[in-house]
Image: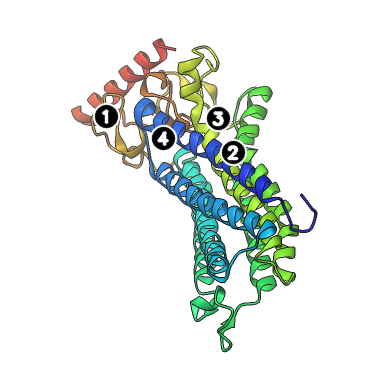
Amino acid sequence: MVSGGDASPIAVLAVTVVFTVLATLCAILRLFTRLAIAHNAGWDDAFIAAATVFSIGSAGLTILESAYDQRRRHAGIDASQQLTYVKSVYASIILYNAALFCIKISLILQYLRIFPQRGFRIACFTLMAAVIVYSNWCVWSAIFFCTPVSAFWDFTIIAARCFDKQSVWFANAAINIISDIATVILPLPMINRLNMQRKSKAALMGVFTLGFLACLMSILRLESLYAAAHLQDGLNYHGAMAALWSAVEINTGIMCSCLPTLRTLLIRVVPHALSSSHRTVPSGQDPRTRSNAHKGAMISLHDHGRGLSGRDEPTQSAYARRHSSIDLDVLGSSTKEIRVVTVVDQEFGKHGDEGDRSEEGSMRDLIHRTSSSV
């Protein structure tokens, strides 16, 4: 590889295939864990599946580009092959931006499933809105980079109008890096508040900060992006390194998003690999609230309103408005591994009607049975 933007077509091909295969494998294992083991698949899984599809499509185009690049360096290519090459570059840019969008949305949706605190959820929705706006600009500006659109690959169109590559690509890259960092650090304050051992907390933070690897890939991509935007044959030789780093970036993002969800699968393969409970409360929460003697009620609810019995149950909001727990089991734990799902800051009336007393007794029985299984 040569610094500045050029890379061997063989190197681009090898790196793209390896990272795409690894990312696809991680996505498949994640979906298997969520669908077949934990039975708690959600929209975050759908978005990561879409990101994987976009990544595979982008990889196919990069392989095509590498083949044409290799041929051009040795025997040359004709005008029709050159046209196909530039069209594949055009399509790969669109798929790259679409994949990044899906990865970020998947991560934010995953946070929303884990952390029920109102302030944190507002921050998540705010970041999600920013990502949606920014990603829409990236995708649509890539599609309509030139007017007419065909001017991107047809250099014979004299009256064409196109965006400035340097301005658009670097603005997009800068916003992408900022949104990457914001997405990664968003849950860290919540994790830092957890009342758990320092070693366990550090390990949990390590899992959630894997996304910094994708941030690093985005930064490393900047030099090749500069070369592709400035050099005369930027879509030929000097697009190779940009294609390589783009493949590494999106596939690293997919892998980092999937790895935290594979805990249940790891437990199935190595039964005692992770035996500690995932349920915890923020620091400052009285540990005695875990006991069934507390006036509050601890209820086990699954995502999408399914309870331990497998029947439809009221959602968390039906029991309380204020939550103080952090639910990490949505990362992949099965229903058999549930200990305590959430702590609800609501006291049941001492003189409620018979239905209320029955509801309280049922939940206390549930806590007793759950605690006895720990």
| Residue 326 in the image: above or below residue 222 | above
Along the viewing direction, whichever of 1 and 41 lies nearer the viewer:
1
Residue named by callout 3: 285
Q: Which one is in front in this view, the residue at disc 4 or the one at disc 1?
A: 4
| Residue farthest left in this picture | 354
Q: Earlier in the sequence, mark 1 or mark 3?
A: 3
Q: Report if residue 323 is visible in the image.
A: no
Please tell me the numbered disc located at residue 18.
Answer: 2
Q: Residue at x 38, y 27 (%)?
A: 38
Q: Earlier in the sequence, mark 4 or mark 3?
A: 4
Q: Report if residue 354 is visible in the image.
A: yes
Q: Residue at x 52, y 12 (%)?
A: 272
Cα distance, mark 2 to mark 3?
46 Å
Q: Position of residue 268 (x, y in %)?
A: 45, 17
Residue named by callout 4: 31
Q: Earlier in the sequence, mark 1 or mark 2?
A: 2
| Residue 26 in the image: above or below residue 333 | below
Left or right: 326 as drawn, with respect to 77? left
Residue named by callout 1: 351
Q: Which one is in front in this view, the residue at disc 1 or the one at disc 2?
A: 2
Along the viewing direction, whichever of 236 and 31 lies nearer the viewer:
236
Which quadrant holds residue 93?
Answer: bottom right
Question: Element at badge 3?
Answer: loop
Q: Amino acid at mark 4?
A: Leu
Along the viewing direction, whichever of 270 and 116 lies nearer the viewer:
270
Q: Amino acid at mark 1?
A: His
